[in-house]
Image (spheres, rainbow, N blue to C red):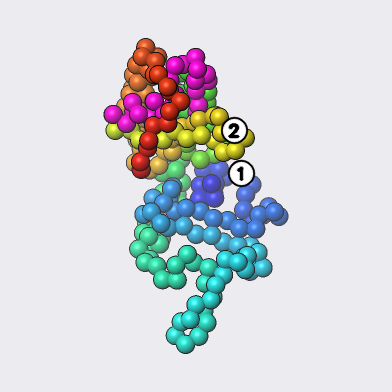
Amino acid sequence: MSCLAPFIQKKLKWGFCIARVKSINASGHKFGMAPLGVGWIIWRTVADLPKELIFNVDYLGGQMPTFALNFSRPAGQIIAQYYNFLRLGRDGFTTIQSECASTAQYLGEQLREIDTLAILYDGHGGIPAVCYSLKDEAEAGFSLYDLSDRLRMHGWQIASYPLPSDRQNMTVQRILIRHGVSRDMIFLLLRDFRKELEYLKNNPVLNNHDKVSFHH
């Protein structure tokens, strides 16, 4: 959220202005349009950085403290992220992420009209994404794992997964809207989504609690 709030949630109070916030981290590859592997974290003060994360390495005849996962890493992802910020500027990045948010909200509104689904997050007020579950899996006669399997035949990879402890009996799907996911693509997704929901309603799945294997 920290990589989007300054651009599309300008009224949201966040960051070091909140006393309890000790660190801010962001994954640039999620919404920063940078390659996988880039991310960063900032601590309020040196004292807030846990000592357990720091280790010393012998380098050029001396001890050098570091808290990176690897002492030496390629910088290509960082350069790509920096280039995007310079090329787009604040206004350009805001425009792109605002469009993503609008697309996510449209998708959430369309999914809300499907009576089989319970919408948990519709894209309003946070990251450009939607999240939903089935209202009643037993009544539906299929699971979200079955829906994932059917959608994959159209080329859509939408993972289904259970929530953490104490809510592990609920299975959800989440769709993130990143730069490049156009409104036309959402039209196609909704077309296939509704088609496969109708198929599953008319063809209930036996043993629909069995999880469908999913590989990224």
Q: Was residue 96 drawn as part of the magenta stretch in this picture?
A: no
Task: Report the mark closest to the observer, 2 or 1.
Answer: 2
Q: Residue at x 61, y 43 (%)?
A: 11
- The image quadrant where one finds the C terminus is top left
Between 140 and 17, the one nearer to me in the picture: 140
Position of residue 66 in the picture relative to residue 159 (left or right)? right
Q: Residue at x 46, y 16 (%)?
A: 140
Of all residues, the one furthest to the bottom in this rendering is 61
Q: Which SS class for mark 1?
A: loop
Q: Was residue 138 drawn as part of the magenta stretch in this picture?
A: yes
Between 163 and 196, the one nearer to me in the picture: 163
- Give the labeled residue for mark 1: 12
Mark 1 surroundings within 10 Å by alpha-carbon count, few (fewer than 14), some (14 through 19), many (20 or more): few
Residue 178: x, y in percent? 40, 42
Q: Amino acid at mark 2?
A: Arg
Q: Which residues are magenta?
A: 130-154
Of all residues, the one furthest to the right in this rendering is 19
Residue 125: x, y in percent? 56, 36
Q: Is residue 25 above or below residue 62?
A: above
Q: Residue at x 56, y 61 (%)?
A: 42
One can see residue 74 in this view: yes
Residue 29: x, y in percent? 41, 51
Q: Which SS class for mark 2?
A: loop
Tell me the CA gap for discs 2 and 1: 28 Å
Q: Residue at x 39, y 67 (%)?
A: 73
Residue 153: x, y in percent? 28, 29
Q: Which mark is residue 167?
A: 2
Q: Amino acid at mark 1?
A: Leu
Q: Is residue 198 above or below residue 14?
A: above
Count numbered badges in the picture: 2
One can see residue 112 in this view: no
